[in-house]
Amino acid sequence: MGRRKKIVEKCERLMDKPEQIRNIAIAAHIDHGKTTLTDNLLAGAGMISQEGAGHQRAMDTEEDEQERGITIDAANVSMTHEYEDTDYLINLIDTPGHVDFGGDVTRAMRAVDGALVVVDAVEGTMPQTETVLRQALREGVKPTLFINKVDRLINELQEGPEEMQERLQTVIREVNELVRGMDEEKYEEGWKVSVEDGTVAFGSALYNWAVSLPSMQETGINFGDIIELNREGEEGIAELRERSPLSNVVLDMVAEHFPNPLNAQPERVPTVWRGDDETQLAEDMRLVNKDGEVVFMVTDIGMDPHAGEIATGRLFSGTLEKGQELYVSGTAGKNRIQNVGIFMGGEREDVERVPAGNIASVTGLKDAIAGSTVSSVEMTPFESIEHISEPVITKS
Ligand code: GDP
């Protein structure tokens, strides 16, 4: 069996096991390394080639984005990861890093259960870090922290182990102050990020290594080793990468510390959806009932040269299948699903069906726009959108 076919089968098996699914977003100030990190996670998980990582910019699908070097439109990627002898399906929804795209960030946050907050070790938290963190918390999304560009502390700023630890502690403190300021209750409940809990990792997305407290305990690598290996130049960095690859460390943290849909949806549904919580529909959404009515929240519309418009989003309840006729919020009549798919790396793969708890991509929803609620019964939508002949969005 070909490698790709094997990955598709693995993803399809995992799709039916919500305990092993993590739906996450990476939230960062622009230039703090979200794209480089994503590429390396995908490469480490075997979804794109190692050589391509850092250059491929898998998340930047629009030509315009490539040219401008900023991520505008949310793109989506999925990967599998083995942690403690269990396979996980990790669905990553991209959030725009640019200040002007606040609405899109909120929408992406509604579709995920965990936010990996990336902060540049040299710059520390920045205004956009605060904005995306606020959006995550407001939507009930739990944060963990990755402190990036640690190589710069060593190579450019020539910091020793104490200075380096102090600087990392400063970033952690800044993030925790933001979390505490935004939601004291959640902060006390365990949303505070900490090295000891394993909810903080740090490293270099550019050079593809990372560490966390659990990883340091496992590999025996300490601060002194990190500095020494970085100063040795290419060979030392290659050793560090080999012993403590970024994707392992970060995806272990994702698997361990972010909730799966079964744990997340009972809490998140009342936060992201304003409908009647006493209905069967609400119950189906809370329980991730794949046999319930279809409730699909569209986060993004993409263009595929062959398949046409593709609606991607979070399936809160029910099972999506080809041929279903579904309501699209704010429009009259129904749309018929042509194909359903999931992401593998940055590419879409058609599958027979997608059950609740997953990020799905669907063709045939011609009336859907980013933000639409697509469902098998008429329902209160996730957000009100006014359809004016062309997809101009006004949010209420
Ligand atoms: P984004 O805007 O958050 O997606 O950031 P990018 O991933 O595009 O990274 C912005 C710049 O920082 C690029 O020039 C990257 O090569 C660089 N960069 C990313 N991660 C690291 C890192 O770990 N160390 C160093 N030194 N540079 C990095």
Image: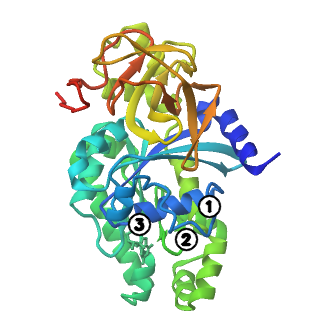
Where 28 sits versus 331, above or below? Answer: below
Q: Secondary structure at mark 1?
A: helix
User: Which mark sits nearer the N-terminus, 2 or 3?
Assistant: 3
Q: Which residue is mark 2?
A: 208
Q: Nearer the viewer, residue 322 or 274?
A: 322
Q: In the rendering, at what x and y percent does residue 155 appear?
A: 43, 88
Ligand 1 contact, mark 2 (Cβ < 8 Å): no
Which image quadrant: the C terminus?
top left
Circle number at residue 44: 1
- Mark earlier in primary sequence (1, 3): 1
Residue 66's x, y, as percent? 39, 61
Mark 1 and 2 residues: CB-CB less than 8 Å, in contact?
Answer: yes
Q: Amino acid at mark 2?
A: Asn
Classed neighbour count for the residue bearing mark 2: other residues with Cα under 10 Å, few (<14), some (14–19), many (≥20): many
Residue type marked 1: Gly
- The image quadrant of residue 183 is top left
On residue 331, the disc is none
Q: Is residue 332 above or below residue 308?
A: above
Decide: marks 1, 3 in contact (CB < 8 A)? no
Residue at mark 1: C-beta within 8 A of ligand 1: no
> How far apart are labels 1 and 3 at the CA level?
18 Å
Which is nearer the eye, 151 or 309? 309
Q: Is residue 211 left or right of residue 180?
A: right
Q: Position of residue 116 (x, y in %)?
A: 42, 53
Front position in the image: 332 or 343: 332
Q: Pointer 3: what residue?
A: 147
Q: Which of 364/362 is in front? A: 364
Dot 2 falls on a residue whose secondary structure is: loop
Measuring from the top left, give residue 24's x and y in whole percent. Answer: 46, 44
The numbered mark, 1 or 2, whose residue comes first in the sequence reads 1
Quarter the N terminus occupies = top right
